[in-house]
Amino acid sequence: MNKKPLTRFTDFLYEELRDPDFALEFLNAVLADGDFDAFLLGLKDVILASRAKAA
């Protein structure tokens, strides 16, 4: 039986966040939730994803 290797969630998330349209929708959704701390964490993820792309 061939099993697909698992992808770490952060790897998957960062790959998705490299798409500017997805990143915008992601941040809008987090901001709409009204939790500013969660927005800051989401913004951090977007920044880290863009840095991972450049590396």
Image (spheres, rainbow, N blue to C red):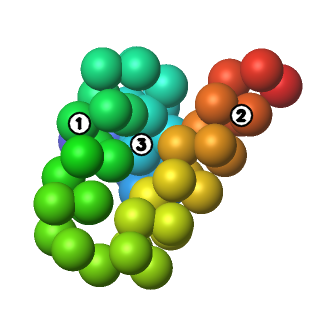
Taking the spot 33% from the left edge, 39% from the top edge, the residue there is 4
Mark closer to the observer (3, 1): 1
Give amino acid for label 3: Phe
Element at label 3: helix
Q: Distance between the residues labelled 3 and 2?
A: 12 Å
Q: Where is residue 1 in the image (x, y as percent from the top left)?
A: 23, 42
Q: Distance between the residues labelled 3 and 1?
A: 16 Å
- Residue located farthest toward the right when viewing the structure as drawn: 55
Mark sitting on residue 36: none
Q: Nearer the viewer, residue 51 or 43?
A: 43
Say which residue label 2 marks.
52
- The quarter of the image holding the C terminus is top right
State which quadrant residue 22 falls in: top left
Nearer to us: label 3 or label 2: 2
Q: Which mark is residue 25?
A: 1
Could you tell me which residue is drawn at 26 percent across and 60 percent down?
30
Q: Mark 3 points at which residue?
A: 12
